[in-house]
Image: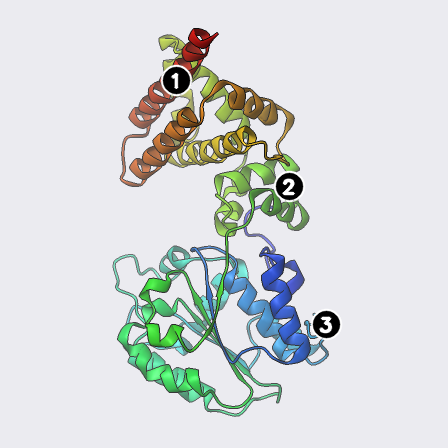
Amino acid sequence: MQTGFEGVKIMTLTDIPVSENIKEEFRQGLQKGSIPHANLLIGVPGNSQLALALAVSKSLLCARPRDGVSCNECPSCKKAEKLSHPDLNFSFPLSSTKEDGESAIDLWRSMVLENPFCDLSDWVMKINAENSVLNIHARECNRIERVLGLKSFEGRGKVMIVWLPEFLGKEGNKLLKTIEEPPEGTYLFLVSSREAGILPTIVSRCRVFRIPIMNVQKLGDWLVETRDVSKEEAFNAAAVSEGVVNKALSVLGDQELNIDEEFLNWLRCAFRNNPLETIEYMEEFIQTGGKEKLRNLFRFGLFFFNMVIKKKYGVTVEGLNREVEKSVEKLAQMLSLEDVENVIHALEKFLIHIDRFANAKILLTQASIQTGRILRGSVAAQGERA
């Protein structure tokens, strides 16, 4: 079984898990030779913006593009897939002002080749910078300008991907002229996870692409197509990841991914409110998973109850397995909209508490009591109305 990050590679534009509208805009730009020279791709951490920038870059450097898109066969494509093409350049945050991108490029390539949906935490772990302050500093900005000032090695242009430009800070002012008037045949892709940290003067000089998170069903389909996993495993990974590709791939690394079944068991236990059963369930749950399993339980819960809201409004919900679908239909009839929203707010609060290092057993106990109380209260209210 191919799970997690095994075998993820620099993909063709068609294969990127991102909205068709964004892919079509890039595809048209590649066909017409009208890709903007400065592009800002913004999305949540671990989303598809870096993979998308890499795919478009590979197409720009391809020797034999097909309708503008990379052929995946020519020497240029092969080098781009290994991130070793001489005209494909990278810049990224570093922990020392004495370093520049050239000194850490091997580590960068290793991380991205393993997982092109990586985020800042992956990079921090890769360079052992947990206690360091990262920046794209003046020395690195000078290197960017120097690299872009060189002639193309293979004559098809040059590409610079600046990963996490929010770490430029005020040093970004050094690049304004290069961003506004780059050398002929030069393309910049600024790949960001936090627009608020980027200088407005940089944003205003770029074509901005906002990359939304994937629809859970579509992400699940993509996982089935690209990973050797079952539909149920893919769906569960997509649901607990909240549509973020990096999270979904990470979840697929779990040995047993049956969070949908686990969630329904927990929901029934919370509803029945049998003290002995609840204690036994929680003891087993914590022993077999701890905080990460609990986080996935609450994330799946958020997805589940959002499906309940959709069902209450008559929206067709696709991709659910039969057991989950039956439970969604049942709770849509049983719960008021206010009840569902109360459960969602509670789960959101519990997720925050996990990240604040709350005790997992205590947190699961509180969640069981609160969720069970809401469910039982709704049933009691229905009985009174009847």
Q: Are marks 1 and 3 in contact (CB under 8 Å)?
A: no
Residue that badge 2 annotates: 229
Q: Earlier in the sequence, mark 2 or mark 1?
A: 2
Q: Are marks 2 and 1 in contact (CB under 8 Å)?
A: no
Q: Nearer the viewer, residue 39 or 89?
A: 39
Q: Which mark is residue 152?
A: none
What is the C-alpha distance between the residues marked 2 and 3?
A: 27 Å
What is the C-alpha distance between the residues marked 1 and 3?
A: 57 Å
Q: Earlier in the sequence, mark 1 or mark 3?
A: 3
Residue 357 horizontal/vertical position (percent): 27, 38
Q: Is residue 10 visible?
A: no
Report helix, strand or loop for mark 2. Answer: loop
Q: Which mark is residue 372?
A: 1
Report helix, strand or loop for mark 3. Answer: loop
- For label 1, the crowd category at 10 Å Cα-Cα, with few meaning under 14, some 14 to 19 and many 20 or more, is many
What is the C-alpha distance between the residues marked 2 and 1?
A: 33 Å
- Mark 2 belongs to which amino acid? Val
- Mark 1 belongs to which amino acid? Gly
- For label 3, the crowd category at 10 Å Cα-Cα, with few meaning under 14, some 14 to 19 and many 20 or more, is few
Tell me the mark number nearer the camera, choosing from 1 and 3.
Answer: 1
Q: Is residue 380 left or right of residue 69?
A: left
Name the residue: 73% across, 79% down: 64
Residue 239 horizontal/vertical position (percent): 52, 39
Residue that badge 3 annotates: 73
Residue 308 horizontal/vertical position (percent): 52, 29
Residue 112's place in the image compared with 360, above or below, is: below
Q: Is residue 288 visible?
A: yes
